[in-house]
Amino acid sequence: MIFSRRGLLAGLAAVLLAAGCTTAVQGTARPVPQPVPPTTAHRTVAPERIQFRLVVTDGTGGLTMTDRDGKQYVVGEVELDGTKVLSAHADFQAEYRSWVVTVRLTSAGAAAFGQLTSAHVNQQLAIVVDDVVVSAPTIQSAITDGVVQISGTFTQDEATGLADSINGR
């Protein structure tokens, strides 16, 4: 017969307990490893490659940038850069049956993004990687928890591609 180690130990413990045996564990307790909170040491993005800029719609000027399809956007100054971004990845939201891109920010990035999104609900925010607009979603609400979801009608490949662009791949 083949027993798993866990099954064998459980059976042995039951036999010893039934026989009235006791045991003691000696030694020093080892701390249980805890998950490490995200820090810049866990960053997966290339900070110099990514920028968040508001799309200018009031005719006050700005910098003209294009997306991969040639669509032009007039954007303002850099509101947040890649030094405030930890990572981006594609996620499937089963309840909506759609793909989204989840971007995680540093604590400083979460505070700055919270202020930015609070002040600019219903405005477009261009996500720029290597001077190309990779996405320009509309800010739906204030985002203060440091977790940004970019939604749309993405396929898995499109969501993964956008996450890879944000990560500098």
Image (tube, rainbow, N blue to C red):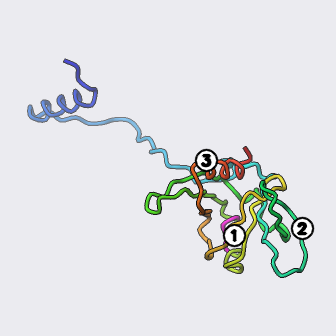
Which picture quadrant has residue 150?
Answer: bottom right
Q: Which residue was labeled with disc 2?
A: 63
* Residue 63 x %, y %: 89, 67
Q: Residues within 10 Å of mark 1 (few under 14, many from 20)?
A: many
Q: Please name the residue that numbered disc 1 is placed on.
A: 113
Q: Earlier in the sequence, mark 1 or mark 3?
A: 1
Give the residues drawn in magenta, as a range.
109-114
Q: Quadrant of the C terminus?
A: top right
Residue extending farthest to the top is 1
Residue at the spot 66% in from the left edge and 63% down from the top edge = 107
* Residue type marked 2: Leu
Q: Residue at image x 60%, y 51%?
A: 89
The type of residue carrying mark 1 is Phe
Q: Position of residue 87 (x, y in %)?
A: 65, 52
Residue in the foreground of this view, choosing between 87 and 123: 123
Q: Main secondary structure of the magenta part?
A: helix
Image depth: mark 1 or mark 3 in front: 3
Taking the image as shown, residue 92 lies to the left or right of residue 56, namely: left
Find numbered disc 3 in the image and state the secondary structure of the residue it sits on.
helix
Tell me how far mark 3 sits from mark 2, CA to CA: 29 Å
Check disc 3 and give the amino acid type: Asp
Q: Secondary structure at mark 2?
A: strand
Q: Secondary structure at mark 1?
A: helix
Q: Are marks 3 and 2 in contact (CB under 8 Å)?
A: no
Q: Where is residue 155 shown, x and y percent of the image? A: 58, 52
Q: Which residue is mark 3?
A: 157
Q: Image check: 156 left or right of 117?
A: left
